[in-house]
Each structure stands twice: as structure tokens, then as C-alpha cells.
Image: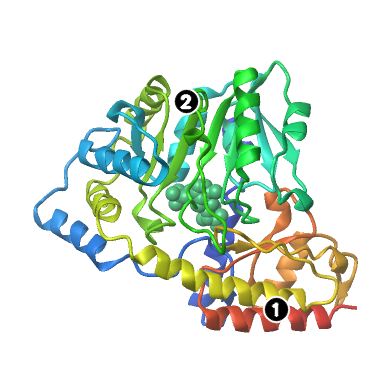
Amino acid sequence: MLSKRAEALKPSPTLAISAKEKALKAKGLDIAGFGAGEPDFDTPEHIKQAAIDAINKNFTRYTPASGMDELKDAVIEKFKRDNNLTYKREEIIISCGGKHALFNLFEALFQENDEVLVPSPYWVSYPPMIELTGAKPVIIETDEKEDYQVTPQLLKRHINKNTKAIILNYPSNPVGSVYYKENLEAIGKIAVENNLYIISDEIYEKITYDEYVHTSIASFDNAFKERTIICHGVSKTYAMTGWRIGFAAGPGHIIKAMANIQSQSTSNPTSVSQMAAIAALNGPQDFIPMMVREFKNRKDYLVKELLTIEGVTCYNPRGAFYVFPNFNSIIGKRYKDRVIDSSTSWTEVLLEDFHTAVVPGIEFGKEGYIRLSFATSMEVIKKGVERIKQAVNELK
Ligand code: PMP
Ligand code: GLU
């Protein structure tokens, strides 16, 4: 018999959909894939070369479980350079992806009776990861009119004596909201007053559009920094999703607890991937603006096209590489003999009948919406949008 924890757990829907998409493509079907949230660019040459050199030099043994000092130093330098934040080595951990850093952190902080505030729409993995620890995710519904941000009033209403932490993700997956400085400052103050940890998932930091820029909540005030754990990684910034290198920065005693969990579970992240991550963080950064420019062209096109569909609204993302259009106007309609009664049945029709892979909004906490990743080629985007329009036209 499986454990209750395992019985209750379902696979990550984003990863499940991208696996389905790949399986259908392998069968020869022409699928327009908007599923996976991973840059379609190749990892830059100098980063790959660093890993090749590491293999050739037989850098293939265990490293310290919490990561190599040289990579921790590169991460420290990154926080200094980009966020004006100063950390010591014992305040940094290198993990097997940003997801693993979050997992270790939740394991280190949460237990039964704890409540963890999760603003919705949220990234699919936060609630299940919280539940695995025995703690309870408490969803805070944010509003498009507030640019999908937690306002101070909203936050105060959800705090009680069991509240342990709030998760902030900005730029956010799935809507691409970038927090206003005023909101971050107000949230930080409330966190200090109520003794809450702030989990700041900044993995999309470098991917922002137009006039929007990312500011870390930890950089406002030392009192905020002392209760903030930043979770981050190289996956999105350097097109390195498969290399599995993430990192976290925060108070030394929390990082130490995370390192203990890591040393009893995965041990170190892959040695050659760590070498690649050093090259990524310390090397030339010109790849990033090139990638962001391309994402912006795709975003602008996609938002414009989605808005031409009758009844559809779509928030214009300010960061990350997802759009999250509202398709509530088609819920209740029929495709052939099938009633579209949810975002899930809509995505099934799109995949099965129109060969277009998207993720149901309900997985991010919002029924009637769907998520499209535009980390895919313009050609696929154009084809996929046409298919979605055709699908809508064929609904009765
Ligand atoms: N946080 C968010 C919001 C994400 O979308 C992702 C994407 N998978 C991650 C964390 C973790 O990414 P990774 O494990 O590849 O570093
Ligand atoms: N974060 C990406 C996404 O949301 C990658 C898949 C995952 O880890 O969930 O699609």
C-alpha cells in the first residue's frame, strides 16, 4: 500500500502535458505545443563548453552536498550585481533546479497546522509541495484590476496565528505580473509585523517587458531580507532547464536545514552542470536581452491575436513567457457531441481535435482560463493561434 502522501499526489500537470505533447509528436502528429514552460533556445555555446571541459577534466565526482564554493561565489556575485544584495557563502545553497530549492525549503520550514499563503493564479507545484509537508496552502485570490498582485488589505485578511509564510512569484507564472514596489514594501512590513517568512520565487527575474523591471523584496530593507528566502535558478535565464541547477539565498540557519535535507536525499547537484552554471553566471550576459527581445515579439503577436477572438480577454504579461487568456465565454458550449464544461475539457478538445497543447487554467487555480507558453517558435505560435480560432468557430 502506498503512503497517504503519495496516494494524494498527482503528477505536475505542466510536465504531464508536455510529455503528452512530445509523445504525440513522436507518433508523427503535427502538434502546436504551448505546454512546457521552457525556453526553446539552445544553451549558449560557452556554457556548454564549460560542461564539456569539466567532463574532459574528469570533474565527475561528488562535490559538497550544498554545492561548490565557486558556484556559491558566482551566485553571491549575481545578487550583488543585479539586486544589490550581500550574502555570505553559508547563506547560499545550490540545488537540483529551482523546484528542488523550493521543495527543500518547504521541508525545512513547514509542518502540520502551518498555513502558507499562496496568491492565485499560482504556479502548479506550490500547493502540492506545501501539502506534502502536512501544512495547508491558503489561496489568496488576486484580481486582474490589481495586476494580479496581493494588496496589503488582501494579505491582512488571510493572516491568522497559524500563518507561517507567503509565497511571492514575480514575474509570475502563469500571468506574468511584476510586483509594484509599493506592494512589495507593504507586504514586507506586514510580514515583519506578523512574523511571516517571505518565499520569493524570482526565477523569471531577467524576463521582463517594456518598462517593467524586477525588484527583489529582500532589497528594500534588512528586516525584509532577514525573513526572505529567494528561490532562483539558471533554467529560464540561460535556457538551461535540463541541466537542473537552482539556488536559494536566505538566513543561514534555514539554508543549513535545507542543506541537511539535500545531503540526506539527492547529495550534490550534478558536478558538470555546476561548472556550466558558473560559466552562465560569470560569463557574457548578452544572450539574455536577445532572448527577451524575441519573447516580446511573440508575446505581442499572441496577445493581439487572442484578443481578436470574440469573448476572450487576455492580460498583457509584463514578464515570464506565458499568456493566460480568459475563455469563460465558451464554457457551456459544445464541440460535436461534447460539452465544454471546464478549462480541462477545453484543453482536451484543443489537443485531441485541434492538435494544440495548452494547460488548463484550473491547474493554476483559475477555472475558464488556459495557459499558453510562448517559449516556442513564431511558426508554432501562428499555427496554434489559427487552430484555436478555428476551434472556437466550430463551437455551438
Ligand atoms: N518556479 C516557477 C514559478 C516556475 O515556473 C518554475 C519552472 N519549472 C520553477 C520555479 C522551477 O524551475 P526549475 O526547477 O527548472 O529551476
Ligand atoms: N515551470 C514550467 C512550467 O510551469 C516547467 C514545468 C514545471 O516544472 O512545472 O511549465
The circle on residue 222 is 2
Where is 100 relative to 379, above or below? Answer: above
Where is 211 relative to 7, above or below? Answer: below
Q: Please provide percent x and percent y for residue 261.
A: 39, 27
Q: Which residue is mark 1?
A: 305
Amino acid type, residue under disc 1 in the picture:
Glu
Amino acid type, residue under disc 2 in the picture:
Asn
Query: Neighbour class for label 1 at 10 Å: few (<14), some, many (≥20)?
Result: some
Q: Is residue 47 left or right of residue 210?
A: left
Answer whether residue 40 is visible to the viewer in this image. yes
Where is 26 relative to 79, above or below? Answer: below
The circle on residue 71 is none
Q: Please provide percent x and percent y for residue 54.
A: 15, 54
Q: Nearer the viewer, residue 317 or 4?
A: 317
Residue at coordinates 33% horizontally, 65% vertically from top-left?
Answer: 286
As helix, strand or loop, the secondary structure at mark 1 comes to helix
- The total number of labels drawn is 2
Where is 179 relative to 351, above or below? Answer: above
Q: Quadrant of the N terminus?
A: top right
Q: Quadrant of residue 186?
A: top right
Could you tell which of marks 2 and 1 lies nearer the N-terminus? Answer: 2
Q: Please provide percent x and percent y for residue 309.
A: 79, 77
Answer whether residue 95 is visible to the viewer in this image. no
Q: Residue furthest top?
A: 161
